[in-house]
Structures are given as structure tokens and as C-alpha cells.
């Protein structure tokens, strides 16, 4: 008779600080990195992992960076590939890669952060379905500190958008459905004139490798993601 293994539950904290440059107009909002990125001791990263947001390489890379470059900066793709493939010592490689990506984000008026600041993870899984929110990132404070941001792009509907809605409810802020996406109103500083700042919320298809199973090939999946990201991002980044 087989016994079920007991569920492994870990309490983890997000390993990276939010990155929102002064020029940012749009913030990419995710959930949390896989378990190995959040380990408090030791270096558990895979050799091809990029030690920052959307840097995992399990069944192939998380495609967010490649998609963003294909949509916003196709000419920069060779440099992205070169930077990701560096074979220098991990600490030096991480510093070079983060600097490159942060400079690129700032140039394209993009910020990047995850909604979960502290969370419970079950069975060491990288699936969002195995995460339980314990503490959310203080998104309202970040938005107040960065008045140029007017849109948030969630990288999944069922989890990231759901957690965003839960966070906003705790902030007594309603998330309204629109024809394309959602929006909420950010209240102005009470010490100044009472104003409402509208923040658009869009949902991007997940760039995680799990989405590949619905497509006949990797190329078909990548092309689908690029088209969808271009359709959603063009009005708020390229022509916004």
C-alpha cells in the first residue's frame, strides 16, 4: 500500500526589488519566480537561468524577454541572445544581465515587478496554482511614487489578475471591467487637490513554457504570443 507524500509547504519572500524607472509608463506585473530563485541559502539556479525577473530556463526559457524584444526592439534580439548566453562567473554574469535589461526597460518606458511579496509555496512547484498569497507588493505606493505610469500589464488572468483584484479590494479600490481589459482609479494625495488617476489594466498571455502544449510547434506558439503582445501593447507603448 502506497502512502501519499506529505505536502511540502515553504514560506518564501520575493528575491528582487520592484524595478520602476522614472520614465516608466507601463508596468509588467507577474506573480513570483520559481522556488529555486527564492531560496535563502545556496545557489540553486540552473546554468542557463537569468537571475532576475522572467529568467527561468526549465523546459526552455520563459519567453517574456524575447517577446518584448520582438515587439519593441527586433534589432536588439542578437544582443539579448548574447547577454543571456554569457558564460562568465555567475555573480558577474548576473550584474551584466540585470544592467542590460534594466537599461533596456528604462529606454522603453517599462517597469517590472511581481504582485506577491511574501507567499506560501506547496511542493516546491513553480506553478502559480501552488502559491498562496501572504503579503502583496505595495503597488499603490509605487504608483504614487511614479506618476508617469498609467497602465499595468498582468502576465496571467487567473492568478496575477486575481491577486491584483484581491490587493485592490484590501485598498478599497474597485477594478472595473472594460471592453479591452480593466481599470481602477488611484486617489490623489489628500494634502493636494482631490484627483482621480485612471490606471489601465491589461492581461497578457502567459509567456511560461506551460502554454506551449496548446500549439503544434514552439514557433507557432511564439508567433501567437508576439502577435497578441503587439496587439495589446501597441496602443499604450508604441503609439501611446
Image (tube, rainbow, N blue to C red):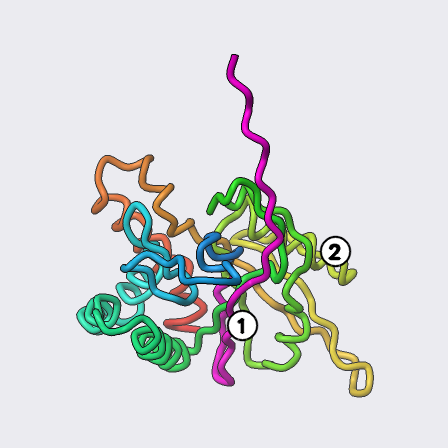
Q: Is residue 111 left or right of residue 183?
A: left
Classify mark 2: helix, strand or loop.
helix
Please check the rendered image and state whether residue 54 is part of the magenta-colored stretch, yes or no: no
The residue drawn where x is 64% and y is 68% is: 139
What is the quadrant of the C terminus in the image? Answer: bottom left
Q: Which residue is mark 1?
A: 18
Give the residues drawn in magenta, as a range: 1-29
In this picture, residue 4 sits left or right of residue 55: right
The relative height of residue 126 versus residue 97 in the rendered view (above or below) is above
Query: How many numbered circles does the render carry?
Result: 2
Compare residues 196 and 100 and report the one nearer the observer.
100
Q: Position of residue 205 (x, y in %)?
A: 42, 49
Residue 2 falls within the magenta-colored stretch:
yes
Query: Dot 2, crowdedness within 10 Å: few (<14), some or many (≥20)?
Result: few
Residue 159 to residue 99: above or below: above
- Compared with 70, 127 (above or below) is above
Which is nearer the eye, 202 or 239?
A: 202
Which residue in the rendered view is the most extreme toward the top?
1
**Residue at 54% across / 29% down in the picture?**
5
Marked residue nearer the N-terminal end (2 or 1): 1
Q: Nearer the viewer, residue 154 or 96?
A: 96
Q: Position of residue 150 (x, y in %)?
A: 56, 72
Q: Which residue is mark 2?
A: 169
Magenta span main SS: loop
Q: Residue at x 55, y 80 (%)?
A: 148
List x then y, in percent, for residue 61. Answer: 30, 54
Sort mark 1 into few (<14), some (14-19) or many (20+) by Cα contacts within 10 Å: many
Q: Nearer the viewer, mark 2 or mark 1?
A: 1
Q: Residue at x 62, y 53 (%)?
A: 11
* Label 2, label 1: how far apart the Cα atoms are: 21 Å
Residue lying at the far bottom of the rendered structure:
192
Element marked by disc 1: loop
Amino acid at each position: 500500500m502506497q502512502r501519499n507524500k506529505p505536502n511540502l509547504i515553504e514560506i518564501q519572500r520575493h528575491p528582487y526589488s520592484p524595478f520602476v524607472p522614472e520614465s516608466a509608463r507601463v508596468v509588467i506585473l507577474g506573480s513570483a519566480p520559481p522556488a529555486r530563485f527564492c531560496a535563502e541559502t545556496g545557489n540553486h539556479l540552473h546554468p542557463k537561468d537569468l537571475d532576475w525577473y522572467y529568467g527561468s530556463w526549465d523546459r526552455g526559457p520563459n519567453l517574456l524577454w524575447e517577446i518584448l524584444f520582438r515587439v519593441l526592439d527586433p534589432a536588439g534580439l542578437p544582443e539579448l541572445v548574447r547577454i543571456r548566453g554569457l558564460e562568465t562567473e555567475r555573480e558577474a554574469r548576473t550584474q551584466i544581465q540585470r544592467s542590460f535589461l534594466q537599461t533596456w526597460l528604462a529606454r522603453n518606458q517599462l517597469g517590472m515587478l511581481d504582485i506577491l511579496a511574501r507567499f506560501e509555496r506547496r511542493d516546491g512547484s513553480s506553478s502559480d496554482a501552488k502559491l498562496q498569497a501572504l503579503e502583496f507588493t505595495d503597488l499603490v505606493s509605487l504608483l504614487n511614487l511614479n506618476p508617469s505610469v498609467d497602465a499595468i500589464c498582468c502576465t496571467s488572468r487567473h492568478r496575477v489578475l486575481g491577486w491584483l483584484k484581491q490587493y485592490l479590494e484590501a485598498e478599497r479600490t474597485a477594478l472595473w471591467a472594460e471592453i479591452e481589459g480593466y481599470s481602477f482609479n488611484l486617489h490623489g494625495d489628500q494634502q493636494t487637490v482631490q484627483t482621480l488617476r485612471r490606471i489601465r489594466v491589461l492581461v497578457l498571455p502567459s509567456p511560461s513554457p506551460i502554454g506551449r502544449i496548446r500549439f503544434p510547434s514552439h514557433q507557432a506558439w511564439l508567433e501567437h504570443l508576439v502577435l497578441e503582445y503587439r496587439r495589446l501593447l501597441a496602443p499604450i507603448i508604441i503609439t501611446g
